[in-house]
Image (cartoon, helix red, strand yellow):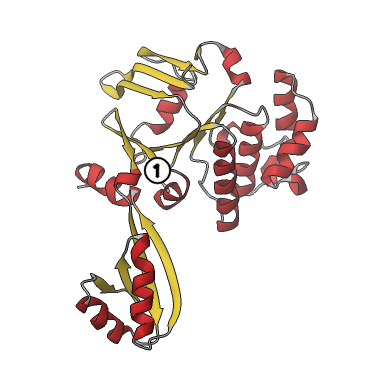
Amino acid sequence: MAILAVHDLSKGYKNHQVLEKISLTIDAPGIWALVGPNGVGKTTFLNVITNILPATSGTVELVGKTNKDSSVFKEVAFLQDNTVLFDYLSGYDHLKYICDVQKIHKKRIKEVTEYVGMESYLKKTVGNYSLGMKQHLLLAMALINEPKLLLLDEPLNGLDPTSAILMRGILLELAEKGATILLSSHNLSEIDRVTKQILFLKDGKLTEVDMNNYENTYYEFVLSNHELAHRMLTEHGYDVEFASERIRIQLGNEQLDMVIELIKGKGIRILDIQKEITGSEKLYKEIFSEASS
């Protein structure tokens, strides 16, 4: 049984075709990222998958059932943007409502709010929440039924670094425990941290890419003598560039130890090393260059 099965899915408005005969099958746990510029149709795709918007044509199955069967939401959750929240209700009220509708034991409220770190403001009205607090509530609402399939529309939007790290850890842990996650995002650096499985949406069509085939790893070194290190490493055949008081080199994991030994061998002190993995951002620019030019 596929967790998500989309067959020839199309959605159009008059003369504008947003989605065009999209087919996608996800039949294993993990994280997939839906990527594309604002306005390309990411939210529309998620809304059609969940039957919030009707498809023009095609079919969707979630956890083995048609998306028109409302009972799928006992095993599926959809995190939308914060416009679905009610300012005059508390976070607790939102979670209690879901428990009442889905006949979930109220103990899950305590479990899920502790898990996402929002227990200190659970009883406050949502109108007094910051953007990050609202994102935490939306995540709690999405997790309370312990879904097999989790659909997330821009879950990293508006998060401070601490909250982004928490969110990233939660997503990775859920996938490790067997959940299947499809998230939309334009935060490419965060995507690189949580998944290598990217779905690029352009001109109404999906292109599925395994980023393991496109990744590059760079190391930035802060050294006691950048000029000497640059000259020495260049002589050894490395492509070295200066980057604001540091040097930057593209390396495979097996090359790092060798470069460190060469640097230390010249008596150069290593003051700091930063690792950067690039992938989705570079490919994103290539795919969408025509749209931005």
Q: Nearer the viewer, residue 230 or 120?
A: 230
Tell me if residue 9 comes above or below residue 271 in the rendering. Answer: above
Q: Residue at x 68, y 31 (%)?
A: 144
Q: Nearer the viewer, residue 266 or 206?
A: 266
Query: As drawn, is 132 to the left or to the right of 242?
Result: right
Give how far across and how far down residue 53 sits, in percent: 45, 19
Q: Quadrant of residue 211?
A: top left
Give how far across and how far down residue 149 sits, in percent: 54, 27
Give how far across and how far down residue 18 sits, in percent: 32, 25
Give how far across and how far down residue 190 sits, in percent: 46, 50
For label 1, the residue is: 196
Under circle 1, the secondary element is loop
Q: Residue at x 79, y 28 (%)?
A: 106
Q: Amino acid at mark 1?
A: Lys
Residue 90 in view: no
Tell me if residue 45 comes above or below residue 60 in the rendering. Answer: below
Query: As drawn, is 171 to the left or to the right of 202?
Result: right
Q: Residue at x 65, y 39 (%)?
A: 137
How busy is the neighbourhood of tag 1: few (under 14 within 10 Å), some, or many (20 plus)?
Answer: many
